[in-house]
Image (spheres, rainbow, N blue to C red):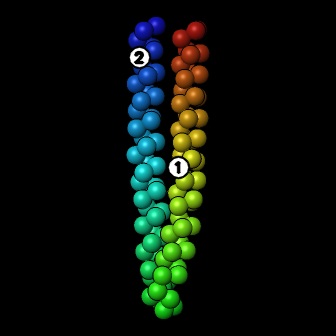
Amino acid sequence: MAQSEQNRRNMANTLIVVVVVLGGFLALAVILSAMFGGLWLDKIFGTKPVFTLALSFAGIPLSIIMMLFVARKTLARLTERYEAEKKKNTN
């Protein structure tokens, strides 16, 4: 039983690291895309900070929503694996 508990903890720790790293990369990608997209639109339309600020502020909630989505999917996978391992150990 101790080995099984240790395996679950290792799996949980690994998934937590994956969620944090993936969430960070997603947030960075969204915010940088919004910033550079805003700069490009400002250059095309001649409006200096309008699109950059608007897209940057819109990118913040979008990155949060994406991080929550990734965290929920990862938690669902972790729960599914935990239940499968629990069922396997009881049989």
Residue 46 rendering spot, x and y as whole percentages: 48, 92
Quadrant of the image for the C terminus? top right
Which residue carries the number 2 mark?
A: 6
In the foreground, 6 or 32: 32
Residue drawn at x 56%, y 16% is 86
Residue 89 rendering spot, x and y as whole percentages: 53, 11
Residue 31 rendering spot, x and y as whole percentages: 46, 64
Residue 75 rendering spot, x and y as whole percentages: 56, 35
SS category of the residue bearing label 1: helix
Depicted 87 relative to depicted 27: above or below: above
Depicted 50 relative to depicted 76: above or below: below
Depicted 65 relative to depicted 55: above or below: above
Name the kind of residue labelled 2 in the image: Gln
In this view, the residue farthest toward the bottom is 46
SS category of the residue bearing label 2: helix
Which residue carries the number 1 mark?
A: 67
Question: Mark 2 and mark 1 in contact (Cβ < 8 Å)?
Answer: no
Depicted 45 relative to depicted 14: above or below: below
The Cα atoms of the two marked residues, 1 and 2, are separated by 27 Å
